Image (spheres, rainbow, N blue to C red):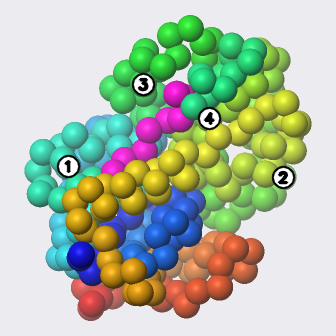
């Protein structure tokens, strides 16, 4: 048993879609969430830059005693997870585009993947699609602009609608029946995309599978918190903590009723 916290980080607020699932599936765990909103988006940064940013975040989380870190960002996973695993003694769980699930479930033999440029350029995406989507027609689409809309809490407005139509329509015209959300910011658009595509197309958010993986790794390595412990959440942003507060409030109202503590970057050092 280990009562240290789990760390979860993303380039910004998108990883909250992963936090939501981890919190849901692992109610006994304490969680520290870090949004690197000051440096968001990561999508067009070089791998070296992302490795440097990820190391800084991980160093901070280790000073808080994190026992496992979730890289809740497809782009950072693609650029940095190998380096992180080599450099630090704790387990890391990363994001993997859910191509396997899409390839297994498709009836039309055509699947769409929406992700950042960095994710498509990474080794992980290429390997995963080579391994699982060999016999499937994959339509890839970079979702430029979507991350920024989530960061600005504008993921429900007309700008989002226009961009989503631009990205999703070609996939539908191509005949896909599965759309993989390959960026952790994109599940904020899930219900809008579902409305656009209708019942015959499945929109896949990999977060539940990632949370299951976190649970498995904790169990395998004897790192689970006590079963009677009620997990706490701490949210830290390197950017606008108010934007995170607004997003959390809307998520919390809909799905959660938990006490949350939100603090800005400058107070990170005083934590715990
Ligand atoms: N949430 C990040 C991801 O999953 C967004 C990347 C970005 O900041 O561009 O890829």
Q: CA distance from mark 4 to mark 1?
A: 26 Å
Residue 209 x %, y %: 51, 48
2 or 4: tag closer to the N-terminus: 2
Camera-near label (1 vs 2) is 1
Q: CA distance from mark 2 to mark 4?
A: 22 Å
1 or 3: tag closer to the N-terminus: 1
Q: Is residue 34 left or right of residue 158?
A: left
Residue 7 x %, y %: 33, 68
Write down the region rendered in magenta. 93-100
Q: Considering the image in quadrants, where does the C terminus appear?
A: bottom left
Residue 243 or 247: which is nearer the viewer? 247
Q: Which residue is mark 3?
A: 128
Q: Which mark is residue 158?
A: 2
Q: Secondary structure at mark 4?
A: strand
Camera-near label (1 vs 3) is 3
Q: Secondary structure at mark 3?
A: helix
In the image, what residue occupies the spot 37% across and 21% down?
A: 127
Q: Secondary structure at mark 1?
A: helix
The picture quadrant where one finds residue 6 is bottom left
């Amino acid at each position: 048993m280990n009562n240290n916290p789990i760390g979860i980080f993303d380039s910004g607020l998108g990883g909250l879609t992963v936090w939501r699932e981890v919190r849901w599936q692992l109610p006994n765990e304490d969680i520290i969430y870090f949004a690197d909103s000051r440096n968001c988006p990561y999508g067009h940064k070089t791998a070296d830059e992302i490795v440097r940013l990820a190391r800084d975040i991980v160093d901070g989380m280790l000073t808080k005693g994190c026992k496992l870190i979730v890289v809740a960002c497809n782009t950072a996973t693609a650029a940095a997870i190998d380096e992180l695993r080599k450099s630090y003694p704790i387990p890391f769980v990363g994001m993997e585009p859910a191509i396997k699930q899409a390839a297994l479930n498709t009836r039309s033999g055509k699947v769409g993947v929406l992700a950042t440029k960095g994710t498509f350029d990474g080794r992980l995406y290429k390997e995963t699609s080579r391994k699982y989507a060999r016999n499937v027609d994959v339509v890839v689409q970079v979702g430029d602009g979507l991350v920024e809309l989530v960061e600005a809490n504008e993921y429900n407005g007309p700008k989002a609608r226009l961009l989503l139509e631009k990205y999703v329509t070609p996939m539908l015209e191509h005949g896909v029946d599965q759309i993989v959300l390959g960026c952790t910011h994109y599940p904020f658009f899930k219900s809008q995309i579902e409305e656009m595509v209708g019942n015959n197309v499945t929109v896949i958010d990999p977060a539940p599978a990632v949370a299951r993986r976190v649970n498995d790794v904790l169990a395998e390595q004897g790192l689970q918190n006590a079963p009677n412990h009620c997990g706490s959440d701490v949210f830290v942003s390197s950017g606008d903590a108010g934007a995170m507060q607004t997003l959390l409030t809307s998520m919390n109202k809909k799905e959660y009723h938990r006490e949350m503590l939100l603090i800005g970057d400058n107070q990170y050092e005083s934590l715990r």
